[in-house]
Image: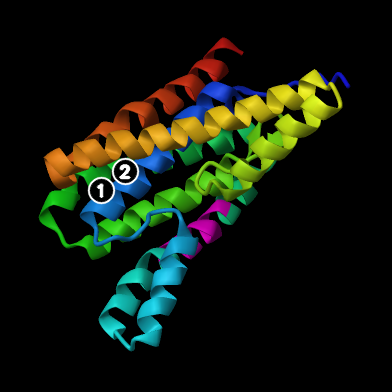
Amino acid sequence: MSIKKEYQVFEGLRIATSLTFISGYLNAFTYVTQGGRFAGIQSGNIIMLSYYLARRDIVQVVSFLNPIFFFTIGQFVVYMTKRYFGTNKWLWHFCSSLMMSSFVLFAVMISPFVGPFLTMAILAFVASIQIGTFQKLRGAPYANVMMTGNLKNAAYLWFKGWMENDPVLRKRGQETILILISFSTGVIVSTLLSIQFSEYSLAYVLLPALYVNYELWKEKSLA
């Protein structure tokens, strides 16, 4: 099996690993500093919401409902943004990336001085924009916020490629493993920095976010 696909930079491995690093970083940051909630992993938030609902702890129910609600709002924005830009995929991805970075920068500036409600709302919105915009790795679907599907794909594709002696499938499996590693690295780095610097550690995630913007802009400039 030999498949060669043409893809733009927003489907490249460098962008994918940067985005999953960002996702791991944001989820660990909110877990450590924002009361055990997740910016993007809504399965975890729904589990905890249901847990506290069963215990009739309405305050906690509302706190976990917050990121779920703003994650949902993010999907409305993704739809409207994608519809506005139409077939111009580069401009859609670039503007989404700028939007994400702008909201993260806003969260960086206010997070140390406001309660967790607003910080969680902003970062859940950012996670929703990210997962709704960047959905492919070199033409193949992947997830850059939640890792369950990636873990399944990494195991299945690599093993199938090995059993069928298919180097393309093995490569896709290996690339998906790199996605998992970059997510885990983001979690580790964020945890260490969040423990040391608390909410000020959010500023460090701007580095990979700006790198994504730079790569997207560079592609258009060189086109």
Say whether residue 195 is left or right of residue 65. Answer: left
Q: Residue 77's x, y, as percent?
A: 51, 56
**Front one among 170 and 71:** 170
The amino acid type of the residue labelled 2 equals Val
Say whether residue 217 is left or right of residue 206. Answer: right
Residue 94 visible within the image: no
- Which of the 4 quarters of the picture holds residue 143? top right
**Front one among 79 and 108:** 108
Q: Identify the coloring.
A: rainbow
Badge 1 marks a residue whose secondary structure is: helix
- Give the main secondary structure of the magenta stretch: helix
Quadrant where the image shows the C terminus: top right
Disc 2 to disc 1, C-alpha distance = 5 Å
Q: Residue 59's x, y, as percent?
A: 26, 80
Name the residue carrying label 1. Answer: 107
Q: Residue at x 55, y 17 (%)?
A: 219
The amino acid type of the residue labelled 1 equals Ala
Q: Residue 200's x, y, as percent?
A: 15, 41
Q: Are marks 2 and 1 in contact (CB under 8 Å)?
A: yes
Name the residue carrying label 2. Answer: 104
Task: Please tell me whether residue 128 belongs to the stretch shown in magenta.
Answer: no
Say which mark, if any, is on residue 167: none
Q: Residue 128's x, y, as percent?
A: 48, 53
Residue reaching furthest to the front: 163
How many callouts does the rendering have? 2
